[in-house]
Image (spheres, rainbow, N blue to C red):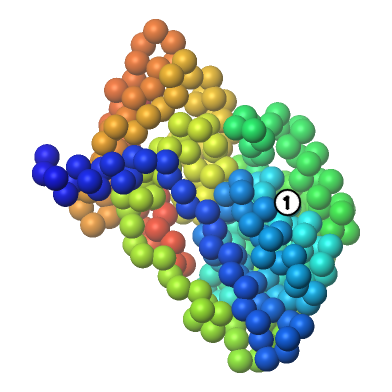
Amino acid sequence: MNKIYISILILFISKFSSAALITKEQTSDPNFHFITVSGAIEPEDGIKFNRIVSEVKNGFVVLDSPGGAVLSGLEIGRLIRNKKLMTGVPSSTLCASSCALIWLAGATRYAEESSMVGFHAAYVIRNGKQVETGVGNALIGAYLNELGLSDKAIVFVTKAPPEGIEQLTKAKSEQVGIAYKSISEVSPSRSTRKDFQIEDQPYDPLKVAVAFYQYLGLADGSSAAALVIPEKRGMGPFNERNIGKFFGSMKEPLKVNSVKLLSSDTVEVNYTYRVSKSQCNGKAIVETGYFMGNTLIKKISANC
């Protein structure tokens, strides 16, 4: 093993941090700001968002996130609603799971035909432990009630499938009463990711594969699922509830020992964990792809 590989390995096995990038841009109107939330939502992002928008009186929150920590998403959503900020998802941009819950909080919501606003069965992590399903649903239900959504809209959001993502189309939005407009109505010169200075993330299979397994070590199914392509969420090794239940009961939590890039899209991850007396010496082959500016996992084959 050469020195370069050792250095890379140490870098990736150190504590992973993928907190969302939250930025604020003042426009020609000194009282109006664009706030961008880009990347996976992490537990501390609610605090960060609060700090950035503390003095914002009027603004538009641009969302570009595959999802992540649900409680942090609810915190950001409440701040948006209290400040009566608008929310929008640019064209060809993904906003799923906890990000979609944030989007709902907009005083006015915006999206484009090619935007992907997707809802998925949510599992709440609190203090490193998965909250019991009924309590988690109650927390999300209370949040949706605070937003003033109709019963039909709340049912649509909370009954999102455990497998895959329920994408909100214009037709569905009209059926369930979740209204939104085109971004061009608030900003005629902006509707795409580039217009809002959102840069696509570099294609990085190593980083995403290690992050996924480190989230397994934390028994954080919601954050792990945010790194999976939308249609595979909730399936097999990507089921958030089972991740929390299984990996939260370990005698010794999962630990990543080594990673290796097998091809431009495929990563080998070696890890260990102990359920009881027996130890798993695991090897996983992780296949990735690029989706709307995000490196996401498509498939995993593992021996344990």
Q: Kindly identify the amino acid type of the residue bearing the numbered disc 1.
A: Leu
Report which quarter residue 264 is drawn in.
Answer: bottom left
Q: Quadrant of the C terminus?
A: top left
Report which quarter residue 152 is drawn in.
Answer: bottom right
Q: Is residue 303 above or below residue 50?
A: above
Whether residue 41 is visible, yes or no, is yes
Question: At which x and y percent is residue 236?
Answer: 47, 36
Q: Residue at x 77, y 33 (%)?
A: 135
Q: Residues within 10 Å of mark 1 (few under 14, many from 20)?
A: many
Side of 242 relative to 4 (left or right)? right
Question: At which x and y percent is residue 170?
Answer: 70, 72
Q: Residue at x 66, y 39 (%)?
A: 124
Q: Residue at x 67, y 53 (%)?
A: 47
Side of 231 relative to 78 (left or right)? left
Q: Is residue 245 above or below residue 159?
A: above
Total labels: the figure holds 1
Q: Nearer the viewer, residue 6 or 215?
A: 6
Residue labelled with disc 1: 74
